[in-house]
Image (spheres, rainbow, N blue to C red):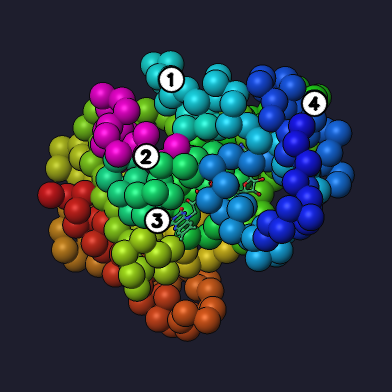
Amino acid sequence: MQAISGGLRVKPAPFVRHVPKTLDEAVRILSRVAAQDGRVLAGGQSLVPIMAFRLAKPAHLVDINEIEALGRIANDGRTLRIGALVRHAAFHKSVVDNPLGRLLAVVARSIAHYPIRMRGTFCGSLAHADPAAEWCLVATTLDASMVAVSTRGERAIAAKDFFTGIMSTALAENELLSEVRLPLLANDTKFGFNEFSRRAGDFAMSAALVTFRLRNGTIVDARVGVGGAEPFPRRIAQAEAALNGQAPSDAVFRAAAEAAAATVDAMEDHQTSADYRRDLVRAVVRRALEQAAQ
Ligand SMILES: Cc1cc2nc3c(=O)[nH]c(=O)nc-3n(C[C@H](O)[C@H](O)[C@H](O)COP(=O)(O)OP(=O)(O)OC[C@H]3O[C@@H](n4cnc5c(N)ncnc54)[C@H](O)[C@@H]3O)c2cc1C
């Protein structure tokens, strides 16, 4: 335990840093300090900047960086299990001989900048739940399962129930996200990813991830996920319906993109209007579909 106080002239408000060596120890500490806005510290790439601005003033940080067991990626034959300390950069190369490995490598390149990818974690990104975070889009589109651990035990939360609002999740304040499980993809899965941001490395203003398979020349098992447009990413059933049973073509892709644009309740913010964001959804979905079909 290490006390960091205002007397040290650091930017954040005073806090106590705990450095557990095991997951059990971490959840025990978290259960004790959660009520005093105790927080998990993973890569620190989101939490530390907001602490420096004093937008967050946690009295305790449970720093999980020395829990070796959380740094593992495992393939159990059905799912890829990604531990809480696996950094974005782990996915620069394919981590599994499956279309999922290639998909993750394509998406990883769009997350922030290289130094941030070296520290930031997959699970930290899910817990932080920025509407435009690429891993949140991946988890939603592929129906991931999140494993939450507390002193009461472990529970799995489906991605569709995990994100509850802008930067809000179903995690209780005393729960640690220990692992995310992503289903491996069928070998013939095609995928495409596209996002739009004003500058390279910025959060996307809209992003789309699509996957589908072809059976006798027609699309089956279509998934269309959209992020950055609404408070949290989601699959767009109307766009998927526009694809399934159709042969891939420019007209079909445009119809699916139109369905996505018509369905989203696009956010408005300091960057852009809802109408413009809706146009972006149309564009990123169409481009992701074109990429998948190549
Ligand atoms: C300039 C800049 C640009 C960025 N651009 C992008 C981008 O384009 N796309 C993108 O996705 N991200 C972007 N990020 C954010 C980056 O990806 C972060 O790494 C990520 O959001 C959080 O991961 P972390 O491990 O750093 O979490 P931390 O900063 O350590 O924690 C973030 C929050 O999640 C909680 N948390 C972390 N891990 C856990 C856990 N295992 N269990 C429970 N709670 C947990 C923390 O308590 C905290 O509230 C950017 C960041 C910066 C500074």
Q: CA distance from mark 1 to mark 2?
A: 16 Å
1, 227: nearer the viewer: 1
Considering the image in quadrants, where does the N terminus appear? top right
Quarter location, residue 2: top right
> Residue flagged by tag 2: what amino acid is it?
Ala
Mark positioned earlier in the residue sequence (3 or 2): 2
Q: Helix, strand or loop at disc 4? A: helix
According to the image, label 3 marks what residue? 112
Report the span colored magenta. Answer: 87-103
What residue is disc 2 on? 89
According to the picture, the residue beneath numbered tag 1 turns out to be: 74
Quick one: label 1 or label 3, which is nearer the N terminus?
1
Mark toward the start of the polypeptide (1 vs 2): 1
Give the mark nearest the N terminus, 3 or 4.
4
Tell me: is circle 3 under 8 Å from ligand 1: yes
In space, the residues marked 3 and 4 are separated at their CA atoms by 33 Å
Left or right: 210 in relation to 290: right
| Mark 4 Cα-neighbour bin, 10 Å: few <14, some 14–19, many ≥20 | some
- Amino acid type at circle 1 is Ala
- The residues tagged by marks 1 and 3 sit, at their Cα atoms, a distance apart of 25 Å
Closer to viewer: mark 4 or mark 1:
4
Q: Quadrant of residue 97?
A: top left
Amino acid under disc 3: Ala
Looking at the image, tell me whether mark 4 or mark 2 is earlier in sequence order: 4
**Callout 2: SS:** helix
Q: Nearer the viewer, mark 1 or mark 3?
A: 3
Secondary structure of the residue carrying tag 1 is strand
